[in-house]
Image (cartoon, rainbow, N blue to C red):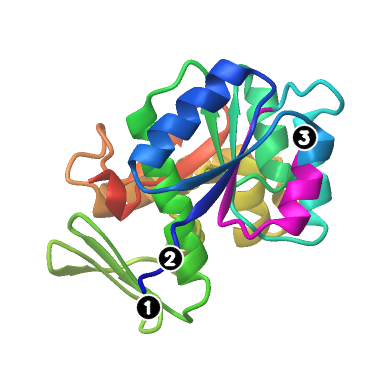
Amino acid sequence: MGEPPLRVLVVDDEPPIRRLLRTSLGAHGYDVVEAASAQEAIVKSSTERLDLIILDLGLPDEDGLDVIRRIREWSRIPIIVLSVRGREADKIEALDRGADDYVTKPFSMGELLARIRAALRRRLQSEVEEPVFRSGGLTVDLARRIVSVEGREVKLTPTEYALLRVLVTHAGKVVTHRQLLREVWGPVYVNETHYLRVYIGHLRRKIEPDPTHPRYILTEPGVGYRLRSPDEG
């Protein structure tokens, strides 16, 4: 017998959205479980065998942000927010509470599928110590601390490498400014966003074929940065 299909919990109070996702994800081999409320989502996330959650924030009984917080108390299952809320503050809040990614409605199914693949791959990679990351011509060997572009080794400063390592660890996921600053420089620097602008610029000049049109380190305006995952081409 083959491996069972990956199971995705779709949490949304709009039946047309659930139907669209059930049909589209099912066509790509996913087994879809549905929930129409926050309480139903909590119950199913704790009782069903799940591989990923797609979560709307505007639920009838409780805000989706609270659902993220409650699930993160006991589970690291990947959570992708799919919401009509497009404000930067909403995205930052969801990511800081523990969401793995954020897609705004209306959405492209192709983009959502790519984000799903990236989140699932991160989950698998988290079980392997010191993986070698590859995306296009960029290779980062975390065990040997070697970075290369198109086969040529790139020399990074300790801070540049620390920043790239965080992005690699969360490849495909939007990492907020505060999270990057906290992990690279420490908690007292979480508001020093000019540090990020300077060092992201340094990294891009060293690893991007064209730093003015980044291929690898992508900007999520007002929110943070995302390292392009291998599935994104």
User: In the drawing, does residue 4 fall left or right of residue 29?
Assistant: right
**What's under tag 1, amino acid-wise?**
Arg
Q: Quadrant of residue 194?
A: top right
Q: Secondary structure at mark 3?
A: helix
User: Does 117 sit above or below residue 149?
Assistant: above
On the image, the x and y values in percent for residue 107 come to: 44, 21
User: Does 21 sit above or below residue 159?
Assistant: above
Q: Residue furthest left?
A: 151
Residue 53 part of the magenta-drawn span = yes
User: In the drawing, does residue 153 fall left or right of residue 49?
Assistant: left
**What's under tag 3, amino acid-wise?**
Leu
> Which residue is disc 3 drawn over?
65
Quadrant position of the N terminus in the picture: bottom left
> Which residue is disc 1 drawn over?
145
Select label 1 or label 3 by which is in front. 3
On the image, the x and y values in percent for residue 140 come to: 32, 69
Q: Secondary structure at mark 2?
A: helix
Marks 2 & 1, CB-CB < 8 Å contact: yes
> Which residue is disc 2 drawn over?
161
Residue 124 seen anywhere in this rendered image of the structure: yes
On the image, the x and y values in percent for residue 82 come to: 57, 29
First to last magenta residue range: 41-56
User: In the drawing, does residue 129 fall left or right of residue 13?
Assistant: left
- Mark 2 and mark 3 lie on one chain; the one further toward the N terminus is 3
